[in-house]
Structures are given as C-alpha cells and as structure tokens.
Image (cartoon, rainbow, N blue to C red):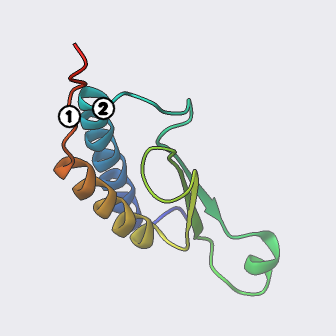
Amino acid sequence: MSITEQEQQELEQIWRLLDEAYHHYFEHSDGYCKSSEGHVSVNFNNFFERRDGESFGVKSVEIYSYVFGPNRSHFFKSTAEALSAVKVWHADEMAATYEEDDDD
C-alpha cells in the first residue's frame, strides 16, 4: 500500500504553494532564511501500529520553515492539516509588501 491519491494531491499542492510563497519572499524581502527552507517530511505509522491492525499510511507531516509559520519545524497529523497551514502561509506571504530601504 502507498499513500492515497488524496494525500499525494495534497502534498503536491503543499509543494506548489510553498514554492510560490518562497519565490515571492526571495524576490521582495531581505532574503534571510535557513538552508533547509521548505523541507517536507512524510512519516508513516510504525510496526507496532501496523501489527495492531492499523493499515499502512501517513502518520504525520513535518515542514521546516524558518520564514513561514511560528516555528522552524511544524508538525501536522495529516497532509490535509499541513495543507491547511500552508494555505495560510501562502496567502499571508502573497499579501505581504516589503518596503525598500530609503537610507540612500
């Protein structure tokens, strides 16, 4: 068994929205970031959960983002929950305006 079609679609949307938000951020901001920006990890259930009858599947999603969200590492219980947060980050970033330094 692999991830569901829904989970795959949600992950693809997460990557697309993160990429769009990062492109905007790097084009308009001071560019401060960490080297692991936008790293997405998908964690699957463990042996004991599967042994006890839980079918193989996504257990959690982790997104590393120093730029977006309240922490560096963000943990979600599902791809749907991660996508919901990324949609907020994306909307906030796309609405952000960055003023140029007027010290010239």
- Residue positioned 38% across, 66% down in the render: 85
Furthest-front residue in this view: 103
Image height of 28 relative to 42, above or below: above
Q: Can residue 5 be seen in this view?
A: no
Q: Is residue 77 visible?
A: yes
Q: Is mark 2 on a helix, strand or loop?
A: loop
Q: Is residue 60 left or right of residue 99?
A: right
72 and 29: which is toward the camera: 29
Point out the tag, 1 or 2, that comes first from the N-terminus: 2
Type of residue at label 1? Glu
Residue at the disc numbered 1: 99
Image quadrant in which you'd find residue 25: top left
- Residue positioned 59% across, 67% down in the render: 60
Q: How far apart are marks 1 and 2 (CA)?
A: 8 Å
Q: Is residue 64 left or right of residue 69?
A: right
Q: Do the residues labelled 1 and 2 touch (CB within 8 Å)?
A: no
76 and 92: which is toward the camera: 92
Q: Pointer 1: residues within 10 angstroms few (<14), some, or many (20+)?
A: few
Residue at the disc numbered 2: 29
- Residue positioned 63% across, 60% down in the render: 43
Callout count:
2
Check the picture and name the quadrant holding the C terminus: top left
- Residue positioned 30% across, 63% down in the render: 88
- Position of residue 72 measured from the top left corner of the image (x, y, whole percent): 57, 50
- Position of residue 75 measured from the top left corner of the image (x, y, whole percent): 58, 64
- Position of residue 86 measured from the top left corner of the image (x, y, whole percent): 36, 59
Q: What element carries label 1?
A: loop
Type of residue at label 2? Ser
